[in-house]
Image (tube, rainbow, N blue to C red):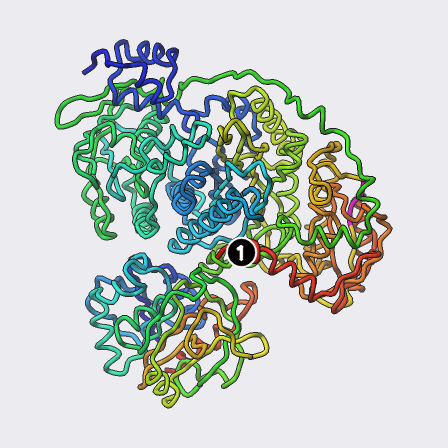
Amino acid sequence: MSQQLENIDEILKAHKLSKLDYAHIKEILGREPNLVEIGIFSAMWSEHCSYKSSKKYLSGFPTKAPWVIQGPGENAGVIDIGDGMAAVFKMESHNHPSYIEPFQGAATGVGGILRDIFTMGARPVANLNSLRFGDIDGNSETNRYLRHLVRGVVDGIGSYGNCMGIPTVGGEMSFESCYNGNILVNAFSLGLAKADEIFYAKAEGVGNPVIYVGSKTGRDGLGGAVMSSDSFTEESKKLRPTVQVGDPFTEKLLLEACLELFKTDYVIGIQDMGAAGLTSSSFEMAGRSGSGMRMYLDKVPAREERMTPYEFMLSESQERMLICAKKGSEDKVIEIFKKWDLDAEVIGEVTDTGRMELFWHGEKVADIPVAPVSEEAPVLDRPIKEPSYLKEIKTINLEPIKAKSNQEIFEKLIHSLDVVDKSWVYSQYDYTVQTNTQKAPGSLDASVIRVKENGKALALSSDCNPRYCYIDPKKGAALAVVESGRNVAMTGARPLAITDCLNYGNPENPEVMWQFAKGCEGIKEACSALNTPVVSGNVSLYNETNGESIFPTPSIAMVGLNESQERVLHSKFKNEGDIIVLLGKTKGEYGGSLLLKEMQNEIRGEISDIDYEKELKLWDFIIKANEQGLLESAKDLNIGGLAIALYKVCAISNMGCNVKTSLKDLELFDESQSRAIVSLKEENLEKVLNLANELGIEAEVIGKTESNKITINDITIDLEKAKDIYFNTFKKVIEQDL
Amino acid sequence: MKAAILRFPGTNCEFDTNYALKRLGFETQIVWHKEEKLPKCDIVVIPGGFSYGDYLRSGAIARFSPIMKAVEAYAKKGGYVLGICNGFQILTEANLLPGALKRNTNLHFISKFQHIKVASNKNRFLSKCKVGEILYVPVAHADGNYFIDEEGLDDLIRNDQILVQYCDKNGEFFDLNGSVNYIAGICNKEKNVFGLMPHPERAIEEVLGSVDGNKMLEGFLAC
């Protein structure tokens, strides 16, 4: 089966394996590897599959709480949401493919995360996405290509989720030059299941059949996991054939067939075929159970002729699953998939050898011990070094901005693409299907879906401010957790747990690795302090083009529970004449602010210490006041501070405001944490102020809602004009060359 | 009142429709497209989704499913049939309703809450609504651009077959997707087969933002 391969150096290079890896492989096998085996090791030890650079730092994440049913390590995390129901969720990146081929890259990103959810027995009920692009406005080739990417990514996400009938209920989109050569596409999905009917990725019981279901295997996506584990250069666009092609219709059939199968008791374990396809699914299932497996690759349904064992093992064709079923149930399992016009074939069986044995028309073509490949993949301790840029960006100079009027500043900031409404994007996503959406995209802060099964509601928010992460990788990551939790709390829900998608640059650069290490520290600190454990996640490294790494971008998605779907708090003002109260302390925070970026094109400064206790009290305040029915609306303050928060709320409420606050000058744009604005009926003012006082939260009555004008101290703008800018700016930019 | 809700491969609103109709007091049954017979029922509902992935043309493949022969016979005998979104597309492809649904003029999927105005209530479906009444109901489609030739449009108008039209919150007609005459939904001449792009089954509870869909679907209850 094995003989010394000719030109082994070239083969190793093509598979991104080092001489050291090669020696390690020979040691594991006790002989020379053949090409199939090299392909398998290459895929399984790729950064994408093995987490070899990141594992060291991920191990200390807080992952436990009484409501956590399943933490990291499975296809998705699971939390208890009461009355026997569980929420299953995860976020994943599809960055590199989306840059090469935006429509298919983004579409298959959605397809992949959906399979992670329904693999566990849950029906997906809500999607979010977190998208980062570069400079989309302007006439350069880069600007035009980025607009093409935005349009393609949005189209791809919409086409997949819409066809599947899963509402895309929210997300975020922001823009920094650092993403010009490396956009980020992070997709989140959440599903619902009965808490005692969760399925896991395992393969056990000697003789139990291993069944392949779903689409046929083609040559698409060949080597995708390895491609995603490398930096980008101009050459990378040539890698288009490594991008998978999605078929949401087949995935919809696969979803329904799997959910039908889960109602039976035939399933031992199930795993989707994502990155590294049949290789990773089979190794992971066997690895987790300490089993072995025998697979007959000539039995795998093929879409193309003359495919080889190597190609079958490494193809990333979409919409496929591997199932370990109970012996004797084969025909019944196959019958369910046939009903849905899907392929289903027994391609192997579970053994107790602890080895993966692969056959091709009777001949053994690979024989690898499972554990060293899946569970004992190499862990690296890469060198780290504090980035030199950090010392140079600590100070900020606000004097030139102070020379300008607040009105002038305001009018500049309200045009920012990070601020304006993105209905051009979300109106391409079906967000009302499944009839659960209570707080839809565009409504600010978290999105909310009700849970028909138990009368409760789930709030979801994905957040990260890459500017904060650039100037302070640790606090920036912590603040992503804090902000996502705050957004969830603003709807009256209690934040429960997060999933993360850690997007960083090239780990072989010690400065990037330092950013990553600090980011993990920040997430650990925030998740512990806020009691919101990490239940699932994904790491995306090598987000670098021509040596330029992206800003650290740890996307965080928080999930929270509202005990009553009747008491979901919205961000928009309800009645004219309601009182507006500003909660929290304004401390003079301008580091990484929207103000600096828009007015001086600078991303610099520092972030002050995070007061988690204060943050939790703010959450408590909103949740309690909402339970008592004291509030009409709540909106947290983030980029652009109080002025921008009021602008956005007024625009979506079709209502103005008359605000006079003690905040002076630039403080209107200050980005201090742990702050919010709430609106309430005058009759509830005393109770609200008492509750704030009880919890030790600063509260200032700053004004009232009114009909047609937005007035904030010395800033004033006509509501109609504000709405026009808020709702139409993005469309003008993105469609300028159509 | 018994409703048969059809399920094709790729249908994705069958459970929403089932939930909405049950809440209103319908007895419901979901029927697989490979069936050749309809169960005993008072109305057939073809729900929204992407039957056969919308491949070839929305609704073009589903119309050949075995169950559609039974639906055609049922409609010819005067039975009530309601097609929502993809269901509307399937009914035009099956020639049970006139006209066709093309790609939206902006070439994008359009998902939003939309105002629609009742054009006629002289039919079972909208019997609980007033003419000129403005309803607020979600739309979610890529191919909702209703087309019919001039002669056909004259027929629709003459026979009072236009059910609802897109409008703004003040009732002014609104060009959402390029549809001829702002048409959002129609019925056949005999007024027993109905199709519309908006989703009444998604506007059934206050927590979802509108209850206007109930008023529409309830029209069938008195059957």
Q: Secondary structure at mark 1?
A: loop
Q: Position of residue A164 (x, y in %)?
A: 38, 53
Q: Residue at x 53, y 53 (%)?
A: A734
Q: Quadrant of the N terminus of chain A?
A: top left
Image point (38%, 84%), residue name: B161
Residue indicated by mark 1: A736
Residue A514 lies in what quarter of the image? Answer: top right
Residue A344 versus residue A13: which sits nearer the camera? A13
The percent coordinates of residue A537 (x first, y second) are: 50, 34
Magenta stretch, residue numbers: A583-587
Whether residue A450 is visible to the viewer of this picture, yes or no, is no
| The stretch drawn in magenta includes residue A585 | yes
Q: Quadrant of residue A481?
A: top right
| Chain of the residue that carries numbered disc 1 in the rendered image | A
Residue A470 is situated, as x and y percent measured from the top left of the image, at: 64, 32
Residue B114: x %, y % from top left: 52, 69
For this rendering, which residue is in front, B220 or A164? A164
User: Image check: A215 left or right of B212?
Assistant: left
Instruction: Kindly give the residue lying farthest to the bottom in the view shown.
Output: B158
Q: How many marks?
A: 1
Q: Is residue A705 above or below residue A662?
A: below
Residue type beneath disc 1:
Gln
